[in-house]
Amino acid sequence: MACPICQKRNPKRFCPAKAASICSVCCGTEREVTLDCPSECPYLIESRRHDFERRDFDWSKLPFPDVRVDPSIAKNQGLLFSVLPLSICAFARAHPSLVDTEVLAALQALAETYRTLASGIYYEKPPDFGFERQLYAVLKDSIQKFKKDLAAGLGAASVADSAIRDVLIFFTQLGARHLNGRVKGRAFLDLLRKESKIDYPAAQGSGMIVRP
C-alpha cells in the first residue's frame, strides 16, 4: 500500500491528521502546510523542538526591533500577562482554524495602537482581514475590561498604557520567534495553551521568556 498523499512511497508514520499512515517525506513536507496537524502529534512536537533549537534569531527582523522588553514584565504585570493568552486561547477554541500568523497580526496591530497611546497620540489601524480583525477587537475589549476591573477592585489608577504596550510587544516578539513559515503553523498558539493550562492538547514548547 502506498502513502495516501504522494501515492509513491511506503507509509511508515501514523498521521493523526489523515487518520492513516503516510511516508516520512510527506510528513515532513506537508506538516502544517496541507495537513492540520493536531498538537499532540509526536512528529510535530519533535520537529518544533528541533527547529526552534536550530533557529538563529535576528532581532532586526522581529516586530519592533528597536524595543527590548525586560523579561521581568512577566512578574511585574502578572495579571495583564495572563489576560492576553487566555483571551487568545478562548478565541482559538471558538475558531479552530486560527493560525499563528493571524494571532501575530492582531497582536502587532494592537501593540502599535498602544505605542501611539503611550506617546499621547491616539491612532488606530486594526487589521483588514477576518480572524485578524476579530481577534484584535477581542483583545482590545479584554484589555479595557481588565483596566476597569482592576480600577474597581483596587480603587486605584489603572495600568498605564505604556505597560500595556510593553506586554503587547513582548507577546508580539515571542510569537514572531515561534513562526516556522508554515501556513498552518500553530506553535505559538500551542505554547500559549500550555502556559495558560488550557484543557486541550498542547505541544511541548520552550518557556515564555524572551531573552535579549
Image (cartoon, helix red, strand yellow):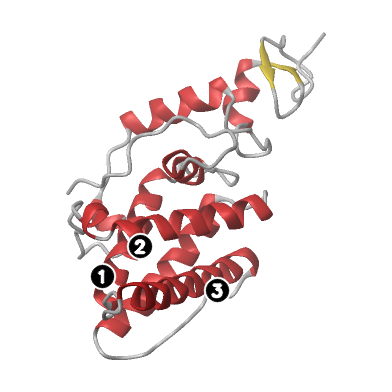
Q: Check disc 1 and give the amino acid type.
A: Ala
Residue 24 position by quadrant:
top right
According to the picture, the residue beneath numbered tag 2 turns out to be: 80
According to the picture, the residue beneath numbered tag 3 turns out to be: 137
Q: Earlier in the sequence, mark 3 or mark 2?
A: 2
Number of the label disc, if any, that sits on residue 82: none
Q: Check disc 3 and give the amino acid type.
A: Ala
Give the Cα distance between marks 2 and 1: 9 Å
What residue is at 43 percent from the left and 60 percent from the top?
83
Q: Nearer the viewer, residue 59 or 200?
A: 200
Q: Are marks 2 and 1 in contact (CB under 8 Å)?
A: yes
Q: Earlier in the sequence, mark 3 or mark 1?
A: 3
Give the Cα distance between marks 3 and 1: 19 Å
According to the picture, the residue beneath numbered tag 1 turns out to be: 163
Task: Judge whether 44 appears above or below 62 on screen.
Answer: above
Which SS class for mark 1?
A: helix
Which SS class for mark 2?
A: helix
